[in-house]
C-alpha cells in the first residue's frame, strides 16, 4: 500500500516539481547572476540607453545623431558573473539599447601581455589555462540559472563568425562566446538579432551614398568636416587597427566589435594587427 501511495504521489507531484524547476527566472535573478544591475524589468529594449548606462555606471564613449556607445574599462575589482571583466560596452541606436558586450580574459587586455610584444611560452600557457577555466566557470554559472544552452553562430564570414552558446530569456539572447586562445565574452542582444546570426538588412548603394553625403558639413569659412564618426576607445592594448575598423564599420551602420576584428586580423598578444588580413576579412560584410 505504501508503495502504491509513493507511486501515485510521484506521478501527480513530479509534473509540479518539473514546472517549478522550469519557471522563467525573474529580472532580479538575472541581475543577481551577472552581479550588476542590467535590468529594471523584464525588457531591456524599451529602456533608454542613458538610463541603462546610468544604473550600470558606464560612461558615454560617443553619440551621433543615430547611435551611441558607452564603454567601461574597469579596475580589477569590477566583476561580472563573479569574474573580472576587462571591458564592458553598451551599444544603442536611436536612443534604445541594441547590445551589451562583456569581455573577460582575452589576448589584448591580459595583464602579462600589455606592453609585451614577445610573451614567453609560460605566459602564453598561463593565459590559455585561465581562458579555458574561466569559460567553464561562466558557462556553469549561467546554466545554474537559465538551464542548458543551445549552440549557435554569430557573425558573417569565416574570420568574423563566432560559435556561441545561447540562452533565451524574455526576448533577450544571452550568448557566451569562447574563441580558442583569443577571448571569453558574453553578449546580450535581441533574439531577432541572434536569430539572424548578427546580420543586418542590406542597404542599397544609393541609400549609403545619401547617408554619407549628408554627413559632410561644409562651413562658411571653407572648412569641410566629416561628421557622425563614432568613437571606439582601444583602451590600454595595441588595438589601434581593430578599433579604427570598428569606428569605420559603425560609421556605415554595420555593428562591429574590435575584439572580433582583432581575431579576424590575427592581432598578436597585446596588439599588432595585420592590416591586409583584417581588410580581407571585412569584405564579407
Image: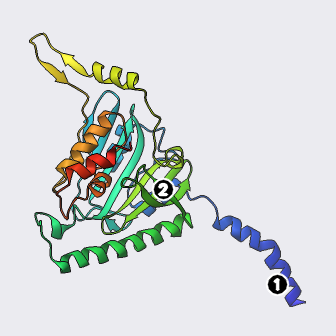
Q: Answer with mark 1 or mark 2, whichever residue precedes in sequence.
A: 1
Q: Residue sitting at 34 percent across and 20 percent down?
A: 210
Separation of disc 1 and disc 2 at Cα?
A: 46 Å
Find disc 1 in the rendering and name its residue.
Answer: 6
In this rendering, would 140 be left or right of 262? right
> Whole-percent x and y of residue 271?
18, 58
Q: Badge 1: few (under 14), some or many (20 or more) residues near its Cα, within 10 Å?
A: few
> Whole-percent x and y of residue 257?
32, 49
Looking at the rendered structure, which numbered label has been put on residue 234? none
Q: Residue sitting at 42 percent across and 57 percent down?
A: 162
Q: Quadrant of the N terminus?
A: bottom right
Q: Residue sitting at 29 percent across and 19 percent down?
A: 214
Between residue 56 and residue 100, name the one nearer to us. 100
Find disc 2 in the rendering and name its residue.
Answer: 153
All told, the count of numbered labels is: 2
The residue positioned farthest toward the right in the image shown: 1
Query: Given contact means CB atoms under 8 Å apart, are the residues at marks 1 and 2 in contact?
Result: no
Looking at the picture, the colour scheme in use is rainbow
Amino acid at each position: 500500500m505504501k508503495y502504491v501511495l509513493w507511486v501515485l504521489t510521484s506521478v501527480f507531484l513530479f509534473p509540479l516539481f518539473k514546472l517549478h524547476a522550469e519557471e522563467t527566472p525573474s529580472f532580479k535573478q538575472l541581475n543577481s547572476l551577472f552581479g550588476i544591475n542590467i535590468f529594471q524589468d523584464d525588457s531591456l529594449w524599451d529602456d533608454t540607453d542613458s538610463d541603462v548606462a546610468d544604473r550600470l555606471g558606464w560612461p558615454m564613449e560617443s553619440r551621433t545623431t543615430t547611435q551611441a556607445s558607452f564603454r567601461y574599462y574597469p579596475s580589477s575589482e569590477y566583476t561580472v558573473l563573479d569574474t573580472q571583466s576587462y571591458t564592458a560596452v553598451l551599444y544603442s541606436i536611436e536612443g534604445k539599447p541594441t547590445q551589451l558586450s562583456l569581455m573577460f580574459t582575452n589576448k589584448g587586455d591580459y595583464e602579462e601581455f600589455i606592453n609585451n610584444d614577445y610573451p614567453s611560452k609560460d605566459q602564453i600557457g598561463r593565459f590559455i589555462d585561465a581562458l579555458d577555466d574561466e569559460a567553464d566557470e561562466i558557462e556553469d554559472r549561467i546554466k545554474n540559472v537559465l538551464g542548458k544552452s543551445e549552440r549557435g553562430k554569430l557573425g558573417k564570414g569565416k574570420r568574423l563568425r563566432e560559435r556561441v552558446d545561447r540562452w533565451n530569456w524574455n526576448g533577450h539572447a544571452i550568448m557566451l562566446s569562447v574563441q580558442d586562445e583569443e577571448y571569453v565574452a558574453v553578449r546580450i542582444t535581441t533574439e531577432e538579432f541572434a536569430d539572424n546570426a548578427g546580420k543586418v538588412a542590406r542597404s542599397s548603394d544609393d541609400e549609403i551614398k545619401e547617408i554619407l553625403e549628408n554627413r559632410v558639413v561644409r562651413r562658411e569659412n571653407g572648412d569641410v568636416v566629416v561628421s557622425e564618426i563614432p568613437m571606439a576607445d582601444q583602451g590600454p592594448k595595441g588595438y589601434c587597427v581593430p578599433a579604427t575598423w570598428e569606428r569605420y564599420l559603425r560609421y556605415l551602420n554595420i555593428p562591429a566589435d574590435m575584439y572580433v576584428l582583432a581575431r579576424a586580423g590575427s592581432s598578436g598578444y597585446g596588439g599588432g594587427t595585420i592590416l591586409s588580413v583584417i581588410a580581407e576579412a571585412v569584405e564579407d560584410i
